[in-house]
């Protein structure tokens, strides 16, 4: 059976239809933790947990230990939960004989045990032992989100907390943290503690509680560049160059590369309506105007030149052909190549 995404599992989970086997795997820790908590909250009642819930860590176990616990009958109850965190660290998980043991158990699991194995790495779903888990239970894959999916995650997570967030604040969070969902959730949790229910998270709140400047960031730099505002662009770039710990140039280059790549898409699109551009760019309609302005400000040839320039500065930022240039020099060269 093909694996489910973590997101689809969370939507479809039914506590009344828990299976005997689950294999969670992937690199996105946020979803692994969320799904793990669902099992801990729903399989064994609180008053039975001391006898029938076993939470263990892979580094302390062999496959034999896992299966010994899985084959044990629950104490005066219908179900027991055996949950293995960091299963990729099980001492003999790479041993062929151990994997055969896992496969054999998966083909005939104990009906009173819910065995959940959580691997913090992607597993090969073509392998027979993994397939056996999918045949009798469920495979759940937790992958990181693409950049264009992060805004929806932020909006949904904020809604869960009974707040709203405006597009600029969401963009600031993304620019500062990226697509690390665990880190994003922690920052939102930190903000939520300080707000009244149903409040809107705006750029001022982000600046106060996360420490991101609402005026000097890549988002504002893109806006200034989109209309070729030289003084503002250089001022923001100078600020970023003076605060490289929070604004490493490689991260800024990636953001600008994505921005100007989208400008190219706007320039080649025959339908220039905001709704259509938001769809093909996969961005919030709030940001479409910046791409549209840049597509008018810069010629198609200049945008291609800018993208080539960004690649050059990226190479130099990684130590290739930099000579005596420091990061501040690279920031200055970056701006000159875009603006002139």
Image (cartoon, rainbow, N blue to C red):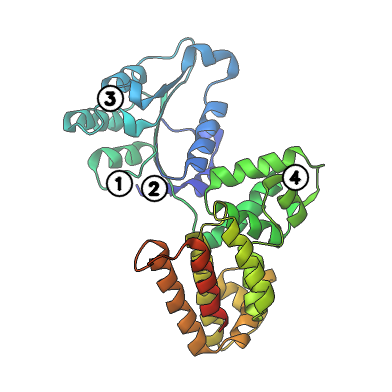
Which of the two discs, 3 and 2, labels the residue nearer the N terminus?
2
The alpha-carbon separation of the residues under discs 1 and 3 comes to 19 Å
Where does the image place residue 273, in percent across and percent down from the top left?
65, 83
Q: Identify the residue at image location x=49%, y=79%.
A: 306
Whole-angstrom CA distance, mark 4 to mark 2, is 31 Å
* Badge count: 4
Q: Earlier in the sequence, mark 3 or mark 4?
A: 3
Residue at the outermost front position: 324
Percent from the top left, x then y, of residue 195? 79, 42
Where's residue 154, x and y in %? 63, 52
Residue at the disc numbered 4: 162
Q: Of marks 1 and 3, which one's residue comes earlier in the chain?
A: 3
N-terminal label among 1 and 2: 2
Q: List the residue tagged with mark 3.
A: 63
Residue 284, visible in the rendered structure? no
- Is residue 171 among what the camera can see? yes
Q: Image quadrant of residue 196? A: top right
Q: Are marks 1 and 2 in contact (CB under 8 Å)?
A: yes
Pick out the residue farthest to the left: 97
Element under label 1?
Answer: loop
């Amino acid at each position: 059976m093909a694996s489910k995404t973590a997101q689809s599992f969370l939507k479809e989970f039914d506590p009344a239809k828990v299976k005997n086997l689950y294999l969670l795997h992937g690199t996105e820790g946020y979803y692994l933790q969320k799904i793990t908590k669902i099992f801990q909250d729903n399989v064994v009642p609180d008053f039975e947990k001391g006898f029938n819930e076993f939470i263990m860590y892979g580094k302390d176990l062999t496959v034999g230990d896992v299966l010994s616990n899985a084959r044990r009958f629950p104490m005066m109850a219908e179900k027991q939960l055996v949950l293995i965190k960091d299963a990729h660290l099980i001492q003999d998980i790479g041993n062929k004989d151990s994997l055969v043991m896992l496969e054999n158990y998966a083909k005939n699991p104990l009906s009173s045990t819910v065995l959940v194995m959580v691997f913090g790495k992607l597993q090969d779903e073509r392998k027979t032992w993994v397939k056996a888990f999918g045949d009798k239970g469920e495979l759940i894959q937790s992958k990181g989100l693409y950049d264009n999916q992060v805004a929806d995650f932020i909006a949904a997570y904020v809604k869960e907390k009974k707040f709203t967030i405006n597009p600029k604040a969401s963009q600031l969070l993304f620019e500062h943290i990226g697509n690390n969902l665990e880190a994003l959730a922690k920052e939102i949790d930190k903000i939520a503690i300080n707000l009244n229910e149903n409040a809107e998270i705006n750029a001022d709140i982000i600046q106060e509680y996360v420490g991101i400047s609402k005026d000097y960031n890549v988002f504002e730099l893109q806006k200034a560049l989109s209309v070729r505002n030289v003084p503002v662009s250089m001022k923001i770039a100078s600020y970023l160059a003076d605060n490289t710990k929070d604004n490493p140039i490689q991260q800024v280059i990636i953001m600008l590369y994505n921005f100007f790549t989208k400008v190219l898409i706007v320039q080649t699109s025959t339908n220039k309506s905001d709704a259509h551009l938001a769809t093909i760019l996969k961005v919030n309609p709030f940001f479409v105007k910046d791409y549209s302005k840049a597509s008018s400000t810069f010629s198609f040839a200049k945008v291609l030149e800018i993208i080539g320039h960004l690649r050059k500065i990226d190479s130099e930022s990684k130590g290739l052909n930099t000579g005596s240039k420091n990061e501040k020099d690279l920031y200055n060269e970056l701006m000159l190549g875009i603006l002139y």
